[in-house]
Image (tube, coloured by chain):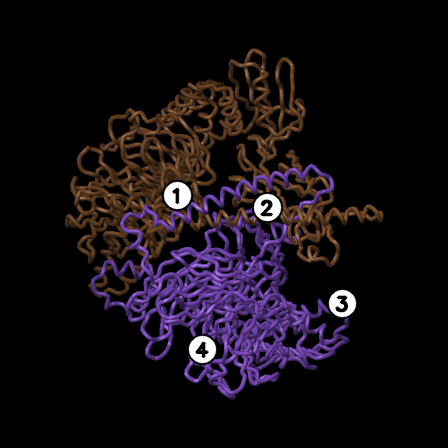
Amino acid sequence: MMELNLSRVDYLQVGVTSQKSTKLFPGAVGKTQRIVVGDQDGLLQCLQMKKGDAQVIFKAVSPKGITRVELGGPVGGARERVFLSTGSEIKGFTKKGKNFLSFDTNLSEPIQSMFVEGADLFTCGNYVYNHYKDCKDTNYFLSADKISDVLCLPMEKNDDITPVLACQDRVLRVLQDAELLYEVEVPGPPVVLQLYGKEAGEEGNEILYGTSDGRVGLVQIGRFAPSHRWELPNEKRNGGVLSLDNFDITADGVLDLIVGRDDGLVEIYSYDEAEEPVQRFNHTLSESVTSVQGGCVATPGYDEIVCTTYAGWVSTLTSEPLIKERGPDTFSLTAEGKDKIVGLRQELDNLQVKVSSEREKYQQSAGSKTAISAVSGFNINDKFVLNREDASYTLSLELQLPIDNVLLQVSLELQLPIDNVLLQSDVPIDLLDVEKNSAVVSYSACNPEEGNYLLATYRCQANTTRLELKIRSIEGQYGTLQAYVTPRVQPKTCQVKQYNIKPLSLHQRTHVFDDNRPLNTVKLTGQFSLAEMHSWVSFCLPELPERTPPGETITFHFMSTFLDTLLECVYSKGEAVFRSDNISTISILKDVLTKEATKKKIRLDISYDINDESIAYTLNLIHPRLEYQLLLAKKVQLIDALKELQVHEEDLTFMSPEYRQILEEADALQAEFKRQPCHLERLYGMITDLYIDKFKFKGVNVKGKVPALLEVLDNYDLQTLVEFFNTSA
Amino acid sequence: MLVPIFNLKIHHKVNPRMVTVGKYDGKHPALTCATTAGKVLIHSPHTRGQRGGRVDTTKDQDINLLNINQQVSSVCAGSLNGKNDILAIGTQTNILAYDVNNNSDLFYKDCADGANCIVIGKLGTIIEPMVLIGGNCSLQGYNQDGNDIFWTVTGDNVCSLALVDFNAQGQNQLVVGSEDFDIRVFREDEIIAEMTETEAITSLCPMMDSRFGYALANGTVGVYDRSARYWRIKSKNQALTIHSFDIDSDGVAELITGWSNGKIDARSDRTGEVIFKDNFASAVAGIVQAEYRLDGTQQLLCVSTEGEIKAYNPAPAEMRGNLMDANLEQDTIRELSLRKQNLQMELKNYDENTKAGVLALQMQQTAAASGNKFSAEKPFPPGGELDQQAMGVIPASTQLQTTLTVNPGEEGKPPHVELFVGTTNDTIIRTVLLFAEGIFDGESHVVHPHPSILSNCLKCPIVPPKDLPVDLHIKAFVGYKSSGQYHVFELTRQLPRFSMYALCKPDIPEPKSSVTYQVNDRVQRVLLWINQSFLLQDDISCEGNLNVAFMSLRGSGPVIIQMETSGQVVIKTDDMDMAGDVLQAMASFLNIDDLQSTADFPEEMEKLRELLVKVDEFHVVRQKLTAEMADHSNLIRSMVVRAEDARLMGDMKNMRKGYLELYNLNRDLINGYKIRCSNHTELLASLKIVNQIIQKSGRLRVGKYKTQVISACRQAIKSNNVSSLFKIIKTGS
């Protein structure tokens, strides 16, 4: 395959951008396309590139930030009209910049996502979906969980209007009118949807989705049921997907997949014979990529991928070779470049003068008794997600300005350069090293009595605007993690962000439950309302909607990312039932719920039903992992010695096949071992908890027997372990 | 983009920092690294080495292995005779100088202090080139006959050495980095400069002229020009190895750093700016340079711990120093735009501040009119747009006050230096971040009180572990209890050198020990020095004779400084270290070049006496054990023969017996070895303390007297003359 060679060029910088807020106008052959971009300062700009310089075709200002920019047009025709959502309003512009539509939806929540298809307008707030036909409200739907994106299958090929909502609870909801047609379960919380090609595949019903844990998939929305075509796992643990596009950048006649992620990675995949995507190219921008789109913007004949980052950089990865204009002499600049630099320098000097005088004024105000110093907040694009692969949390912070330092207690993204970040936590958690970030971390001694289990500062290198941190929590230990973020901008301020570490922090929503497992049950009855119970449950478990879902009885299913044990929560007014095959999960829930109820002075009657078989079942679930980890540790230990033998022996046939295999796989084994630090310790911890919890329900304290248990674990054998659990106490 | 000219794998692990290159036959360079299990590998693609002796065979024809049979701690190649290079290999107990070309040992010496690092070359006016070894607190130099013609002591375990023309006089000085965070420069055995860093100095390398590069255990690398630091940078990774090499062919050597995450970067020696970088899959073990292709150009050879070698030629001149494929135009535009954005943000901040100010003033006036109290906590009309924006607001007149005091401690609280931070109004201090080097575990310390006890002042305890002046960079987050955004106040305070000492009344019981010396200066000058160097509430003043007493907060008892108008100074303390610190600090303040003193430290001397007795005992035990071991190994040999004989003759009963005896003997031998090991560690510890005491007694003198004391002590120890040793420590000669 031909190698893709794309180079990065920056066009301009706008304000902080939201997801999907950059679009390219459709272009004609031999002509360049215009860019239209909206930012959170409310500015919409339509740009044409001329000789490397962005010229504004038209501008429009809205009082509120622009959350989406979409292009629309007649069904099947060219999409040449610009639609944008700002606050609760939708505005439309022609390609010349004439404002032909201003439509206030009068919704209480601001519009978060929007899609335009012909005369149909689809908008979503956090939970509410609305469908307008010719600006008349036609349909309405209340989603059970947060909606992050919406689109509608092309009407050319589909008779019905089929909108699809991407919802936080790991499903795509396919609607028909105001009714839910069906739900499509996807492997992670979907954040972005994109039609597959302009036509959404041959049958007009194929859509791509990207999840916040970094997966991409293609699903065919059938009439009655979906069918999953392929799914790209996120093995390298790259960032979450923020933007998707289809564009034939490889010029082989087949559309390629373009993925933009929140860690700044832009990837290009082309499809192999089996129509599965294969990575062809990647490039790392330093900030979250909020939009990607393929097209031809700067020079006719050279395709490029226009990317917009969170901090507002509109950049491109172009196939146009830059070397030719540069020549061998890298110090000479092109004429346009020179002009641009001179212009920028001039602008900077003017700004500098202005800033100095303002700074002086500000400092003088310190003498006044009545004056205040008010510094407005800066945007922080933060994300706190659970990674399924290694059961740890990633916190990412991004600013528009460089970060000075971060005092941790957790991850951030800002538009500002970060000076430092201070993290503080009142829960015992471990901070893991993230290779990508270059900030220097320093831990400070802290006193748990003062509510500090962790105090860490991240001093950032110059121009860092994004920081990613990894955190490992322990189930049952809960509290908050606070990040104090200081950007490198005068006057210096710092913002505090709080993140909850929930008691069952390693659980994840699923939509299936296996009733055949031996289950432990805890039943709570008392004078509580449904909303109260919901708030307690969402205090314990992640990924739950903030508002109480509709209905009298609510059911949620969870799976532990670490052990694959299940949890079912069923609650209604006055009664709540939790079932899990893991006794520790039940024990944690019981403890936390009682505590929460006591806080509200509500009396709870608790009855539980412990299934002794569940212990053996859970141990069996752990068994293959534990055995694998033990074996891995053993193998890794042998590698050095075996390698030494290898050096001295010409012929290795005398070794047992097992040893030879270890030698062959040495690198892979070591890499795997490195990837999951403390995995064994965590498993041991879980087994110990299981042991303590089992006997806690029987009213026996077995803390004194833990050393004996650890001894059994050291010479691990499933049968002995199960027996130990059964006999001791 | 600069790319490696060759890339090869040697399939051996390489120990970090143990890579060197030598021309063992005088012509062809051979890369040499220490590898696992006490072996040293020599990669010689140009000469096929012979076999036998220490040399072991391998599959790879280009690689020879030397069996050292001990954990190798350092390797270095260099020339002692001006012709071919020899290889010096250090272990924890020995030093081996090995002639690779002739496959023979040049010399093999015991060195009880270990050989943590080695350099080979000429030092100062000593004509012969030497193998210079840094061990536990000691420095030794051997000539090619294996005689130790150079010896001196230093403050702590040596972890790095370099020969640098520090004074630009055409002579090498020895730059020594040690575990006590100090870089010391020795002109032969005299210390001519001392720089304090923030961590153990793991690597040093000479650069051009009087410059040298250094790397610390906490991930810092930097460049010194003589005793002034040019630049430094800190990374979260560790710099394992540094080397200087002119990679961009501009005539000035760059500092090449190999990092623990496998990164290699070349930095300009003037600014520290990265001009080239590359990556390995594993940590970088060593960087050396050699004419490895015999084509007349020097190559930079980088070796990773997994045995991967990458070699780079210096960049051709037409690259004009642009080794990273950087697009200057794009980079400049990006940088300018970033600056523009930052300025615009700042401008926006001022703008919004003005707007908010107008609104708040109205609120203030209405509040005043209606008699309500106004607070900057809620300065805006409730429910308004600004109110919802969660701005960080404080009164503009807010000021931050800081004071440093000595807190002698109380029940449950160890003594410490207390930093008080407070605001001038009703704002609260959420958190205080202190950045300072060398006094905290990390580079910063955070005080983050429980939300329920927030107030407008905060006390931060600081316990500096060493007597050093430190700059405290204070960042205080100021706002209100309900704030989500705080103002950051930044300021810097200096902690004086002797901050962990509380002033007390002069009538406290006097310590038994003291050091007495004469200075040609006025009492007032010394008083000035005391006021500057100690943390005092108010400056001390005195008429006539000076008599000040302090109590150490680190528990080493009282310190009394007395000075008579005649210029005689007495420092009374039982802590010899402390006395040395005070004397050295005072001498440098008063610009004294040479200073002789009388030291009377009865307790310390008693300790030394005991130590020396102990050292003797250890030596005796060691000899006894060695003899026993030799006995046993003879016995074993005969027993094996006997047992095997029995087996061949089918006498199973005797064979069993023989092997049983052998087993028991083997066990004894192992036990003996264990005893020997612990004996050795104790011996090492004692020797280290002896070295430290000599070093301390040196610190009680300045300039040439210091050198005198140390070399005289060395002589006394060599000749085992204990009583003269005490006399030397006391009188200084």
Q: Tell me the SS state at disc 3.
A: loop
How many angstroms separate mark 3 from mark 2 (CA)?
Answer: 40 Å
On screen, residue B343 above or below B525: below
* Residue at 30% across, 37% down: B252
How many angstroms separate mark 1 from mark 4 (CA)?
Answer: 45 Å
Q: The residue under label 2 is which amino acid type?
A: Lys
Q: Tell me the SS state at disc 1.
A: loop
Q: Earlier in the sequence, mark 3 or mark 2?
A: 2
Q: Tell me the SS state at disc 4.
A: strand
Task: Look at the image and tell me whether residue B102 can be seen.
Answer: no
Q: The residue under label 1 is which amino acid type?
A: Glu
Discs 4/3, front? 4
Check residue A492 in the rendering and tell me which mark sits there, or answer none: 2
How many angstroms separate mark 2 from mark 4 (CA)?
Answer: 46 Å
* Residue at 32% across, 67% down: A665
Q: The residue under label 3 is which amino acid type?
A: Lys
Q: Nearer the viewer, residue A483 or B718?
A: A483
Q: Are marks 1 and 2 in contact (CB under 8 Å)?
A: no
Discs 3/1, front? 1
Check residue A600 in the rendering and tell me which mark sits there, or answer none: 3
Q: Pointer 1: what residue?
A: B273
User: Residue B269 occupies which quadrant of the picture?
Assistant: top left
User: Residue B713 occupies which quadrant of the picture?
Assistant: top left
User: Where residue A521 sits: x, y (%)?
Assistant: 64, 79
Q: Pointer 4: what residue?
A: A218
Q: The residue under label 4 is which amino acid type?
A: Leu
